[in-house]
């Protein structure tokens, strides 16, 4: 799960995804990262922590890290929150096999629409909307990737 800072959107995506993975009895490894390095080592944004808490989800064990080119080999699927994150990740890829793993996350529930998860950092009212979009997206990821 990749956004810009790894403090607002992708920590919520990681938390939501981990809970669904557990509920579905899957053994997937879920992680998140930011394309930027400004917030490395930091807790998620307090507003993301708060909105997660309203959904009985604790994301305070997470610390921000920067996305690494090696993540393109480590992980089977890499989900960008928006088109800018997508471009930044793709720019680190050397092979088509790496590029093929990268997708904008809302294209899983809404194929071909290229809908971005809006960056809520500069306002205060977008966090519940981000949560709802990511809940929809993660549910679709479970369905798409867990079917035998
Ligand atoms: P995120 O939000 O990419 O969802 O974690 C942001 C966090 C920090 C900044 C921008 C977006 N920033 O400019 O510091």
Image: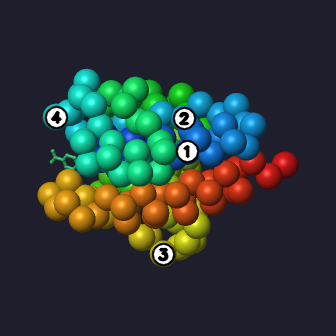
How packed mark 4 is, by other alpha carbons closer than 10 Å (few <14, some 14-19, many 20 or more), is: some
Whichever of labels 2 and 1 marks the residue nearer the N terminus, that label is: 1
Q: In the displayed structure, would residue 96 be above or below residue 123?
A: above
In this figure, which residue is indicated by the disc labeled 1? 17
Determine which residue is flagged by label 2. Answer: 30
The residue beneath circle 3 is 113
Disc 2 to disc 3: CB gap under 8 Å: no
Q: Earlier in the sequence, mark 3 or mark 1?
A: 1
Q: Toward which corner of the image does residue 143 lie, by quadrant?
A: bottom right
Is residue 90 or residue 10 the one in the foreground? 10
Of the image marks 1 and 4, the number of the one nearer the N terminus: 1
Q: In the rendered image, which residue does mark 4 sit on?
A: 38
User: Residue 144, image x and y in percent?
Assistant: 70, 56
The label shown at residue 35 is none
Which quarter of the figure has residue 97? top right
* Whether residue 103 is visible: yes
The answer to whether the residues at label 2 and label 1 have Cβ atoms under 8 Å apart is: yes
Model colouring: rainbow
Ligand 1 within 8 angstroms of badge 1 C-beta: no
At a point 17% along the width and 61% down the height, the residue shown is 123
- Marks 4 and 3 close (CB-CB < 8 Å): no
Q: Residue shown at 46%/64% (left/top)? A: 133
CA gap, disc 2 and disc 1? 7 Å
Residue 69: image location, x then y, percent: 39, 32
Q: Nearer the viewer, mark 4 or mark 3?
A: 4
Placement of the N terminus among the 4 image quadrants? top left
Determine the residue located farthest toward the right in the rendered image.
148
Mark 2 secondary-structure assignment = loop
Q: Is residue 113 left or right of residue 138?
A: left
**Are dots 1 and 4 in contact, CB under 8 Å?**
no
């Amino acid at each position: 799960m990749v956004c810009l800072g790894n403090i607002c959107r992708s920590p919520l995506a990681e938390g939501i995804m981990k809970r669904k993975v557990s509920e579905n009895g899957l053994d997937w490894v879920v992680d998140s990262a930011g394309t930027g390095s400004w917030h490395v080592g930091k807790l998620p944004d307090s507003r993301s922590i708060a909105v997660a808490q309203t959904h009985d989800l604790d994301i305070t064990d997470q610390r921000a890290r920067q996305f690494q080119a090696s993540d393109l080999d480590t992980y089977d699927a890499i989900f960008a929150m928006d088109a800018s994150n997508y471009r930044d990740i793709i720019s680190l890829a050397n092979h088509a096999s790496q590029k093929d793993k990268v997708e904008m996350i809302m294209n899983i529930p809404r194929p071909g629409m290229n809908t971005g998860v809006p960056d809520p950092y500069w306002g205060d009212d977008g966090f519940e909307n981000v949560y709802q979009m990511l809940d929809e997206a993660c549910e679709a990821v479970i369905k798409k990737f867990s079917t035998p």
